[in-house]
């Protein structure tokens, strides 16, 4: 069962070698002042409006030189080809455009990974028309960021990097970029939202803006009214108007710093699968309503969390004595932790908080599951409605669902034949008899730990 997600366009456009590229860039703005306009003549009103609202012209003019147009050429893979090529002929090529922002005077340029992914050559064009070859310093697909280096340059105009944590919804923002190849295009809007999860990757934490973001502007900057970069434009919702997403600059600064130093990003890892602690799960697992944190749904055998004693159904509520509000925050905070450090994690277990110490290891390139996707939320009908049997071979923990009654609470919860039920609440089950006993003990909603196609998550079956 798939959870709903926003379908995104990473604003790339394809030409006939196929163009591919990015999202729109942004720039700085002058804020509006909230002032009532007194009764006056039309000409006086116009003058006061201009005085109060100001103009973005000077700010845009100052910021444009730090924004660049990025052109790329890459060979198409066989599965990308739209036209069959004769044997032994030259590989067809794809070209495309995106945007970027200069962050050091000697040629460091920040952009999106999807703008330069697979590029054979990269050319960067400055606002004065000068074109410079660039090479990739490092990329990070998890955050869709890339750091480029312009060759043989100095004294370039540099954008100032701001603090995205200080932004408030409703603040004015400005984008500068190259939508559809229209160089140095300026668009203005407000910050529409923060902390958006759009299904782009495990570290989603996007800024949302209604400043126009269009194909060709990927990797371009989003500026605040002080002329500071506060985001890197990345994605739009197809068919939506005024819905664009930017990577917060605080995250981009962390990633670009590692890319410049090592050419890659190293992230912390503790070896747990986590999921959102919803009100339904709080009720079914007898977790206090006021609890915030991340619910542990799986633990990597012999991993750091398992060694420290973290178990399924524990709720991680703090790291280093800093409270964790949700599963996404936990993932981001663990990723920042230094490798080899032993860190205190505060758990809620049986309504009591306790602290364990977890040694942070490097996140593997491929791990168990990034974030288990919970099954469809349950309906509200009267009880269970499934048949189960023991696992084969005998002795393995869990029971197999052999049938689901149509319209039953189990069916409403999204359970399917073939699902593996590993636990009822915090209590593991090894046999069908164990399952029956545990279910009979529960008064109210059931929280079943379900495994399907390698993903493990708690599912609530309503009473």
Image (tube, helix red, strand yellow):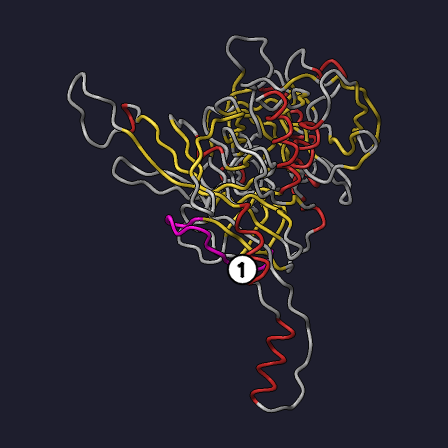
Magenta stretch contains residue 222: no
Going 76% across and 16% down the picture, which residue do you hit?
A: 308
| In the foreground, 67 or 343 | 67
Relative height, residue 31 to residue 201 (above, below): below
Q: Is residue 35 visible?
A: yes
Q: Position of residue 21 (x, y in %)?
A: 40, 39
Which residue is under mark 1?
Answer: 188
Give the residue drawn at x 46%, y 24%. Answer: 418
Horizontally, residue 183 falls left or right of residue 165, namely left
Q: Residue at x 43, y 29 (%)?
A: 117
Which region shows up in magenta? 178-191
Q: Position of residue 409 (x, y in %)?
A: 54, 40
Position of 197 with respect to 403 (left or right) is: right
User: On the picture, is 273 further left or further right than 358?
Assistant: left
Quarter of the view holding residue 9? top left
Which residue is outermost to the left? 86
Image coordinates for residue 58, horizontal then vertical, percent: 58, 61
Q: What is the quadrant of the C terminus in the image? A: top right
Q: Residue at x 48, y 43 (%)?
A: 68
Q: Hey, which quadrant is residue 334 in on the image? A: top right
């Amino acid at each position: 069962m798939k959870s709903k997600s926003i379908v995104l366009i990473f604003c790339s456009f394809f030409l006939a070698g196929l163009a591919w590229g990015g999202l729109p860039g942004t720039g700085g703005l002058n804020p509006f002042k909230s002032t009532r306009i007194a009764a006056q003549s039309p000409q006086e009103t116009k003058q006061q409006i201009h005085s109060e609202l100001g103009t973005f012209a000077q700010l845009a003019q100052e910021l444009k030189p730090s924004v660049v147009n990025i052109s790329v050429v890459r060979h198409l893979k066989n599965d990308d080809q739209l036209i069959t090529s004769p044997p032994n002929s030259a590989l067809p090529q794809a070209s495309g455009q995106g945007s970027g922002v200069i962050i050091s005077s000697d040629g460091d340029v920040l952009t999106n990974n999807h703008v330069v992914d697979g590029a054979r050559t990269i050319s960067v064009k400055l606002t004065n028309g000068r074109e410079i070859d660039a090479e990739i310093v490092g990329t990070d697909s998890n955050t869709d960021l890339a750091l480029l280096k312009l060759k043989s340059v100095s004294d370039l105009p540099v954008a100032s990097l701001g603090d995205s944590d200080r932004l408030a919804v409703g603040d004015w923002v400005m984008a500068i970029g190259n939508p559809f190849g229209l160089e140095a295009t300026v668009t203005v809007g407000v910050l529409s939202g923060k902390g958006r999860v759009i299904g782009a990757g495990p570290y989603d934490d996007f800024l949302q803006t209604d400043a126009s973001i269009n194909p060709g502007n990927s990797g371009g900057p989003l500026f605040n009214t002080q002329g500071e970069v506060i985001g890197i434009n990345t994605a739009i919702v197809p068919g939506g108007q005024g819905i664009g997403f930017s990577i917060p600059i605080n995250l981009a600064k962390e990633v670009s710093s590692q890319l410049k130093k090592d050419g890659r990003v190293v992230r912390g890892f503790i070896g747990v699968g986590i999921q959102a602690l919803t009100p339904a799960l709080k009720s079914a697992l007898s977790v206090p309503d006021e609890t915030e944190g991340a619910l542990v749904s799986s633990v990597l055998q012999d991993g750091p969390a398992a060694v420290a004693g973290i178990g399924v159904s524990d709720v991680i509520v703090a790291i280093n004595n800093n409270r964790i509000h949700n599963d996404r925050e936990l993932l981001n905070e663990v990723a920042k932790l230094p490798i080899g450090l032993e860190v205190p994690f505060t758990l809620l277990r049986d309504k009591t908080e306790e602290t364990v110490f977890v040694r942070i290891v490097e996140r593997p390139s491929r791990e168990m599951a990034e974030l288990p996707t919970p099954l469809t939320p349950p309906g509200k009908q009267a009880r269970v409605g499934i048949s189960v049997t023991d696992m084969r071979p005998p002795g393995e923990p869990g029971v197999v669902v052999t049938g689901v009654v149509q319209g039953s609470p189990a069916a409403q919860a999204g359970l399917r034949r073939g699902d593996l039920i590993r636990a009822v609440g915090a209590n593991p089950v090894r046999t069908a008899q164990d399952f029956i006993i545990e279910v009979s003990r529960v008064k109210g909603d059931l929280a079943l730990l379900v495994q399907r196609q390698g993903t493990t998550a708690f599912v609530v079956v309503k009473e």
